[in-house]
Image (cartoon, rainbow, N blue to C red):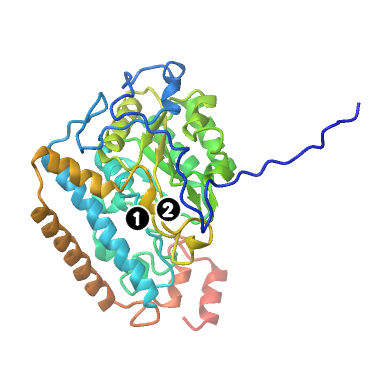
Amino acid sequence: MKNTVPLQLHVPEPSARPGQPPDFSWVKLPAAGSVTRPDIGAEPAAIREHAFALIRVLDDNGNAVGPWDPRLDPETLRRGLRAMMLTRAYDNRMFRAQRQGKTSFYMPCTGEEAIGVAQAMALDDRDMTFPTYRQQGLLIARGWPLVDMMNQVYSNSHDRLKGRQMPIMYSSKEAGFFSIAGNLATHFPQAVGWAMASAIRHDDRIAAGWIGEGATAEGDFHHALTFASVYRAPVILNIVNNQYAISSFQGIAGGEHATFAARGLGYGLPSLRVDGNDFLAVHAVTSWAADRARSNLGPTVIELLTYRASAHSTSDDPSKYRPADEASQWPLGDPIARLRAHLVALGAWSNEQHAQLAAEVDGAVRDAQREAESYGTMGVGEHHSPATMFEDVFKEMPWHLRRQRQELGF
């Protein structure tokens, strides 16, 4: 029989476009502290609702409530606040440096600082991380030198990567920070593979990988979940849902009718959804997943609900695809402001201390920038010789590369 109704293709539409008022009515916020905290050995099917809920610890008054409260001491909280503020100050200066022609490209993580910083603090420094280009907070929280990061952004004479990577695609074996790749999603199965190797060696280190919600549409995402599930790899699989993949909203990647955390359920994986702008909630959920992995109970999928407050990169103009004041209307607020409010509520912070810290981190970034720029910036100062393009690949350089190098005069 012939269809009587013509078929139609559904194309997801964002809740608001430029020129329209922001609309976040689809973001359902349960009360802080209302989501249960299961035992780390809980069966995935038994905690299915956690993939659709939203784990929150900080209430509207800055108080930590509920079973997920990690009960961090004030000094740890202050360290987290400093690392987040340092990350934002670093981003601001590097963004301006690109506008001044000192580097070709930059990508900030404005509004997402709690993710990189809180997760770095919840993990062991020896654990291996497989980040995307918006987890610079991992390096900063682990104390990696800002000057070294800036040298790589500038591709100057002190760039350890010798100008071979795009700016912001950091790499540090010493800091347990796997080389960032521009071809998205590849690091997710790499994180699983590293974790499997750690288990095969009977090591005690786990791995953590990050992916944006847009990249969950890539096949590598599903390959990673398959291997993680089958072999119970000691890995944490983080999905950073910041609402936009470059210029397409999260509905294009499948977030219109289901959460991204729910994708883990089909693979038999415990899946949690957390307020990504709540430092305490992010720390608690990451600690839970890390304890599970270290106990040989397998991987965990975590969706971190957040918002990309800045442009995707210095090449992006978000005013072309979202309302101009949308960032200020995001219902989960600003992660730095929320942790500050919590410290104030504890009586462990003041406006004067906050102003002093803001000046301190800005000065630290300014000093690091001054030193890094003394080694050169894009088009200015010394850079690595083009001869280095032939190095660091083969232990002994093959004849055809030697000939090519000689033909270039090196």
Q: Is residue 49 above or below residue 124?
A: above
**Residue indicated by mark 2:** 326
How many residues crowd mark 2 within 10 Å: few (<14), some (14–19), many (20+)?
Answer: some
Residue at mark 2 to residue at mark 1: CA–CA distance: 14 Å
Q: Position of residue 106 (x, y in %)?
A: 40, 65
Q: Nearer the viewer, residue 244 or 26?
A: 26
In the rendering, at what x and y percent does residue 357 appear?
14, 57
Q: Classify residue 56 by image quadrant.
A: top left
Front residue of this view, candidates 62 and 51: 62
Query: Which element type, helix, strand or loop, lies under badge 2?
Result: loop
Residue 142 shows up from this direction? no
- Relative placement, left or right, of 113 versus 251 is left
Judge depth for marks 2 and 1 and give the one in front. Answer: 2
Q: For this view, does 385 lie left or right of residue 175?
A: right
**Image vertical order of residue 158 relative to residue 296, above or below:** below
Tags 2 and 1 in contact by the CB under 8 Å rule?
Answer: no
Q: Amino acid at mark 1?
A: Thr
Which residue in the protein does label 1 denote?
Answer: 110
Three-letter amino acid code at the position of disc 2:
Glu
Rendered view: 362 above or below 322: below
* SS class, disc 1: loop
Asked where in the image residue 353 lies, by quadrant, the reply is bottom left
